[in-house]
Amino acid sequence: MVGTDPRGALIAELDRPLALTAAASLPSSAKAYRTVADANARRTARARQAQQQAKKQQMAAVPAASNDQAQGQAQGQAEGQGAEKDAVEMAAKQAAEAVPDPGRPIYLQEAKLRTEAALAADIGFAERLVWFWSNHFCVSANRIQSMSGAYEREAVRAHALGHFVDLLLAVEGHPAILFYLDNLESMGANSTAGINRSRGLNENFAREIMELHTLGVRTGYTQDDVISFANVLTGWTLVPPGADPQHGGEFTFNPRLHEPGGQTVLGKRYEQEDVEQGRAVLRDLAAHPATATHVATKLARHFVADEPPPVLVEQMAKTFRDTEGDLKQVAIAMVSSDEAWRGPPSKLKRPGEWVVGMARATGITQVDPVRYTGGQELLGEALWRPPAPKGYPDDEASWIDGVGRRLDVANNFAERITGMADPQVIIEDVFASEIAPEVKQAVGRAESRPQALALLFMSADFQRR
């Protein structure tokens, strides 16, 4: 069906469920957060116990000194104190490290589930939409490792083919992004906590929502709008795991952090006094015309071209506006437009897509998450670890210099799977023989099957889409 009706095949895939049935075995983001917090607490307790024990042992080992001996011992004490301190610190370090860190295994389990979902997909268009939105609303596992995978499942995947407003509300109310964008401790100057603790407002969350998630840059909002919106979002935080072992890590609205009174954002007054004030602003941002254009541009840039046709962007933006942000309909509008298919394949695949493409071409359905995530990091697109809140870039200039590193990965992969993959079969079945003649010739003349596979994986036909 893909070969005879590619548009229809892509659109048909959007009707299939995106839920991951295997996710039932994984912890929720809040549970993962509590698990790591509990381990950190045990680690700290073990370290303190070891410190106390080491100090007691050192004191017991020091014999009582007479007055005549005291003067001679004073000089030696100064020299020995440094060694004793090192011994105490080493004992504390060893005791802490004896408590395993559960964050890394949780991250790897999530990575395995996510990657194997892409490998098992019939076509992969819907999975790529999940990946797109996860990058658009990115968090970083460097800061919140335990929640990074569950955040994508709970907030992004669940709404990737729904309405943008629901996706936006789910994302911005998720503890992972509140943590990542520094909103947990943000408090209004006139809030109870702000007065008592002399702490201040953090504008980061509000600015990134406007600039990256909704309106885009230079779309009419001012610094005053950012400040007002930041005040609206004060009180959006999570339940401290130490205070509540049952609900720690879950979203909560804390009125003691919230700036009292109404706020004006983009010329509209919001008088709500609770969490609904922030949700009302988010709903209006989701419906703003600039958001439609920003979202359409980013989608078209990701799937079609670095400089997408303006006609295509406007078609998608209009669909966004007309359907109140129905993301499935926006995706259908993109696939259905002739503008999306006019030019030759020009998009350079990002490392994650290229690696999964190789695995899919050879029929692999399971991955070693340690090897996979290590390879992604080597190629510059570490899973759920973007360099900044704007996510990984989607233009060729940002990735072209790293293509050379793909050769090592392609050679290594080809050596490992040479017994289970035939390059000629890949050309016939995956490419339906629509591949450049020079690539066919190079693959056919290769000295070995691993070399033929590596040449195929490194060809322009495989690197681009």
Image (cartoon, rainbow, N blue to C red):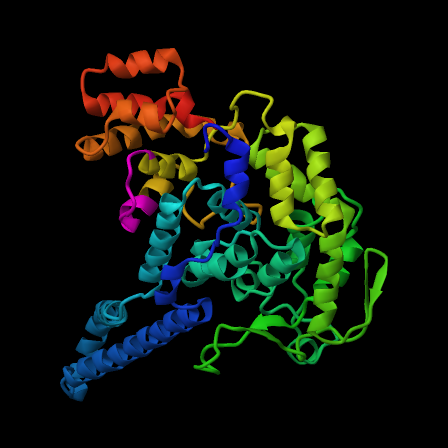
Q: Of residues 96 and 183, which is closer to you in this image?
A: 183
| Residue drawn 19% across the image and 79% down it | 58
In the rendered structure, the answer to whether residue 191 lies left or right of residue 247 reads right
Q: Can the viewer see residue 293 in this picture?
A: no
Front residue of 273 and 423: 423
Q: Is residue 133 left or right of residue 232?
A: left
**Is 59 part of what is drawn in magenta?**
no
Residue at the image position 56 percent from the left and 64 percent from the top: 174
Q: Is residue 261 above or below residue 391?
A: below
Task: Say which of 174 and 339 sits in front.
Answer: 339
- In x, y percent, where is residue 275? 69, 72
Which percent across, then down, holds residue 374? 32, 44
Residue sitting at 36 percent across and 11 percent down? 438
Q: Quadrant of residue 204?
A: bottom right
Where residue 209 appears, as percent x and y from the top left, is 66, 54
The answer, for residue 138, to whether it is visible in the render is yes
Q: Which residues are magenta?
A: 361-373
The mark tally for this picture is 0
- Quarter the N terminus occupies: top left
Q: Is residue 7 above or below residue 58?
A: above
At a point 28% along the width and 26% down the height, the residue shown is 425
Give the left or right position of residue 145, taking residue 292 as reference: left
Q: Position of residue 181 (x, y in %)?
A: 57, 58
Quarter of the rendering containing residue 298: top right
